[in-house]
């Protein structure tokens, strides 16, 4: 039997931190971590839709969610991204399409205090 000294415990703790970090990071640099919200103002929603990456956030103003989204091809980070701006009233949503068959919606929260990604009638995340 061996005794657990401080160095052994430090080594075990460091190994656990490294293992957890490895499990939480994407497999490659091109993979984007998904965040579907709901998020408060100025916090990003990140989503891959088909062959497109989408980064969206909102600023509150005049009782609305003033949404800004940036869309780019997954494989072409160096090309010019597309920027979209739209103002949504509380409960209102807008659709972001990657193709004719792949899309998702962004919905403004009940009091224009959050933004969430939804899929048709099903909400990915709720507040």
Image (cartoon, rainbow, N blue to C red):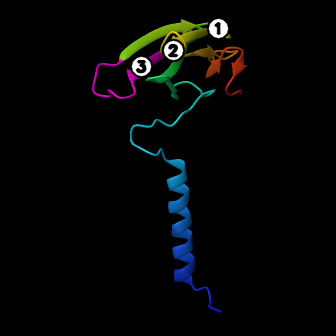
Cα separation between marks 1 and 3 = 21 Å
Q: Secondary structure at mark 1?
A: loop
Residue 25 at x, y = what percent? 49, 47
Q: Is residue 114 visible?
A: no
Quadrant of the image containing the C terminus? top right
Mark 1 vs 3: CB contact within 8 A = no
> Which span is picked out in magenta?
66-81
The residue closer to the viewer here, 24 or 38, is 24
Q: Which mark is residue 67?
A: 2
The residue closer to the viewer here, 116 or 66, is 116
Picture residue at 48% right of the left edge, 13% below the top = 99
Provide the residue designation for mark 1. 92
Picture residue at 46% right of the left edge, 46% below the top = 27
Asked which quadrant contains residue 122, the reply is top right
Provide the residue designation for mark 3. 71
Picture residue at 34% right of the left edge, 19% below the top = 81
User: Which of the marked residues, 1 or 3, is nearer the chain's N terminus?
Assistant: 3
Cα separation between marks 2 and 3 = 13 Å
């Amino acid at each position: 039997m061996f005794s657990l000294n401080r160095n052994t415990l430090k080594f075990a703790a460091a190994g656990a931190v490294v293992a957890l970090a490895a499990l939480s990071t994407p497999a490659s640099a091109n993979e984007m971590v998904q965040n579907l919200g709901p998020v408060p103002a100025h916090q990003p929603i990140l989503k891959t839709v088909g062959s497109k990456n989408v980064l969206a956030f909102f600023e509150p103003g005049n009782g609305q969610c003033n949404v800004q989204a940036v869309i780019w091809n997954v494989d072409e980070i160096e090309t010019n991204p597309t920027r979209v701006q739209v103002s949504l009233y509380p409960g209102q949503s807008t659709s972001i399409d990657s193709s004719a068959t792949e899309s998702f919606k962004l919905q403004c929260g009940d009091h224009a205090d959050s933004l969430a990604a939804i899929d048709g009638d099903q909400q990915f995340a709720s507040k």
